[in-house]
Amino acid sequence: MQRIYMDANATTPLLPAVFDAMRPFLLEHFGNASSIHQQGQHARAAVDHARESIARLMRCRASEIVFTSGGTESDNLALFGVLNSGDHLITTQIEHHAVLHAAEALEKRGIEVTFLPCDARGLISPASLIAALKPNTRLVSIMLANNETGTIQPVPELAHIAKEHGALFHTDAVQAAGKLPIDLSQSCSKPSGSLKDVDMLSISGHKMYAPQGTGILYVRRHVRLAPLFHGGTHERQRRAGTENVPGIVALGKGAELANQWLNTPEGPAALAALRDRLEQTLLAQIPESGVNGAGTERTPNTSNLYFDHVEAEALVIALDLKGLSVSGGSACQSGATEPSHVLTAMGLSTARARASIRFSLSRLTTSDEVDQALKIIPDAVARLRSLSPTWKHSLALASA
């Protein structure tokens, strides 16, 4: 059976070029990047090269890159690194749990936290941020692109509001990096795309075709960050611990490839066209279905669809048995009994949230794979609906 992978927001495959770049540092070039001998200096040069590659992708200084173990650590470092008892944190109800659970832990340490609501499209209103600001607001943390719906937040405007108030701004860009241009420079000429007012930004390597267990936190040079870990003076005393040289090299290579892909005709526009064909064909073929987050700008690979009268978990299993890998939402919440916190925050009923599936394509997804998926999905939905009492009731009402 040919397997089709459409769960890239959970993790991306490791690209061969990325593996080729990291392989020597798993075997031959095994030195500690903090050692002064030749093996150590070779490792240090590789880490520095990767740092420069990531800085080019994000249009920032290499010295502002802090290597971490992934998006969760980066998010935690950003929040715990700048907040103290008595400070006020503003975040949203639709963040990844790496931010939400960190915020809840901070509340227990005396941090005041406000969770902003979103509208029915999954967007955070600048007006709601303005209304939530307080004299003691120290940090605003709002994700750049949502991991479940792909909805892109107006981060340039939100970050500017925070800056005008004197607060720091952090964005979780785990689902945006490598899919959208990221420009942290002060010279960006596009106000709508400029992230010049962002102070901290999180990235995860395994969403960018690099290995799991790699990531970075961008920290603008004026930000004073208290480390989560205490030990050596690694990463300019911002993140102690011997560098994961193979993972860092792989992440650097992933950034280089992402930079190339973002600037080719076969890049985001082509991927969005595949996503749109999948989405539009399914909506045309399957009644009582729709797009969660419709009418908003989304990442080019992500489509979150609901199929009423179907349990998402059952549909994910049915599709998996046919060779198609998709997700019912965030991979970090797989197996959860509660419906998606993102979809319920958008106002979806519990039934509709539980009937929602996320399709997230990768740069390796082909047109033939989309064609095959379009044969599998409608049949699977129809079979599950044939067992659904609510579907039978809906048909009866329609024919009455």
Image (spheres, rainbow, N blue to C red):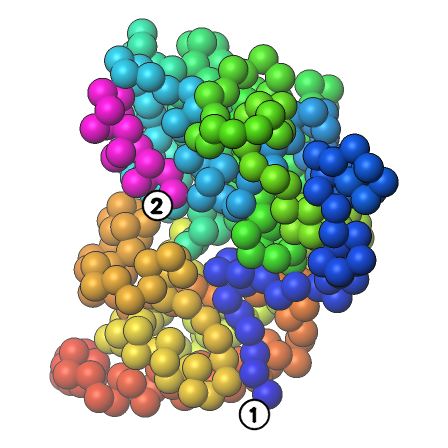
Question: What secondary structure is the magenta-colored segment mainly?
Answer: helix
Q: Residues within 10 Å of mark 2 (few under 14, many from 20)?
A: some
Residue located beneath label 1 in the image? 1
Residue drawn at point x = 34 percent, y = 86 percent: 382
Q: Amino acid at mark 1?
A: Met
* Residue 345, x across and y down, in percent: 27, 46
* Vertical side of 35 occupied by 288: above or below: below
Q: Is residue 103 magenta?
A: yes
Marked residue nearer the N-terminal end (1 or 2): 1
Near-viewer residue (218 or 94): 218
Q: Nearer the viewer, residue 285 or 313?
A: 313
Q: Nearer the viewer, residue 227 or 257?
A: 227
How far apart are the alpha carbons under marks 1 and 2?
35 Å
The reply, left or right, for residue 129 in relation to residue 10 is: left
- From where the camera sits, is residue 251 visible? no
Q: Is residue 104 left or right of residue 183?
A: left
List x then y, in percent, for residue 77: 46, 31
Start and end of the magenta stretch?
Answer: 97-113
**Residue sitting at x 56%, y 79%:** 4
Q: How far across and how far down the image is residue 357, in percent? A: 38, 67
The residue to which callout 2 is attached is 97
Q: Type of residue at label 2? A: His
Magenta-colored stretch includes residue 215: no
> Which label is found at residue 269?
none
The kind of secondary structure element at disc 1 is loop
